[in-house]
Image (cartoon, rainbow, N blue to C red):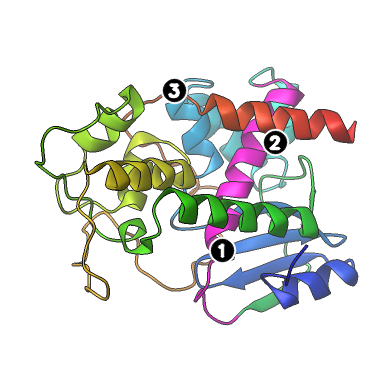
Amino acid sequence: MRAALSPMLGHLAAQRATGALLRGNGTLYLRDGEVVHAESPVSPGLDVLLTLGGRIPAEGWREAVERAGARRQVARFLVDNGRLTRGELEVYHLGALYDAAFFALAPGSGPARFRSGLSHWLGPVRPVPAEDLQREVLRRRRLLEELWPRPEVDTAPVVRSRQAPLPAPTRRQRALLELADGTRTPADIARRLGRPAFHVLIDVRRLAAAGHIQTPAPGAAPPDSPDSPVSGAAPPPSPVSAARFPEVSTDPDIALLLRIRDALEARL
């Protein structure tokens, strides 16, 4: 691969370190040098993807967190109690991990620090080699650049354009546009829809390229969004704070699930 996104992550991988790599936009959890979990305030967590996607009820997630979070065995509890199959858990978890890592490793995420020995309350699922993770992050960056080379739309409030005629948006894109009230950013919309934030960025850039969304002027400072989390490093959440249940449901991203499934099968 080309130059590493995070030299510290590469160093920790080489040293087979265990702990948490904290950056301004998120946290990567490592075990023996591999990434086992990732979180970002920009990205909906595994709980949101599972509950809003309709795979498990909100009370099922809450029970798992309350009964197994302190022992850092939430993942095992979900499987052992029939909430998810092992394969389903791995697919959903990898989707959440890659999504959060994309933002945690974003440019300008601030200085990194490492807390040795820190582990996540979810417990082990399937680790991802650091090199594979960084390669996927680079692939996603290139994809966004190819779709619409204006990164301002990634963080600015989404404003609908009234131009006509325009290519008709897809059903998933219409759900996004319905929430584009001029104050919500793509991250806000991802949390409301319960979709991975990177998938929302893909739709935002496609809609901007098609003229459905206004692209802000370069260098324009976006107004604060009431739905956005406070910027800066976010501490690892406790099992109690992890039980978030947003309101709106959507279909899972089938293409991503298939790609993750193929990656899992290739490693078996």
Describe residue 171's horizontal placement relative to residue 115 as left or right.
Answer: left
The correct choice, above or below, for 230 with respect to 66 in the image is below
The correct choice, above or below, for 55 with respect to 234 in the image is above
* Amino acid beneath label 2: Ala
Q: What is the spatial separation of the Cα atoms under label 2 and label 3, in whole angstroms?
A: 22 Å
Q: How many marks?
A: 3
Looking at the rendered structure, the secondary structure element under dot 1 is helix
Q: Work out whether residue 82 or residue 248 is closer to the camera in this orientation and state it.
A: 248
Q: Which mark is residue 251?
A: 3
Looking at the rendered structure, the secondary structure element under dot 2 is helix
**Among numbered discs 1 and 2, the one appearing first in the sequence:** 2
Q: Which mark is residue 104?
A: 1
The residue located at (76%, 60%) in the rendering is 30
Residue at the spot of label 2: 75
Describe residue 26's horizontal placement relative to residue 29 as left or right.
Answer: left
Q: What is the spatial separation of the Cα atoms under label 1 and label 2, in whole angstroms?
A: 22 Å
The residue located at (78%, 62%) in the rendering is 1
Which segment is the magenta one?
Answer: 84-111
Q: Which of the 4 image quadrants contains residue 263?
A: top right
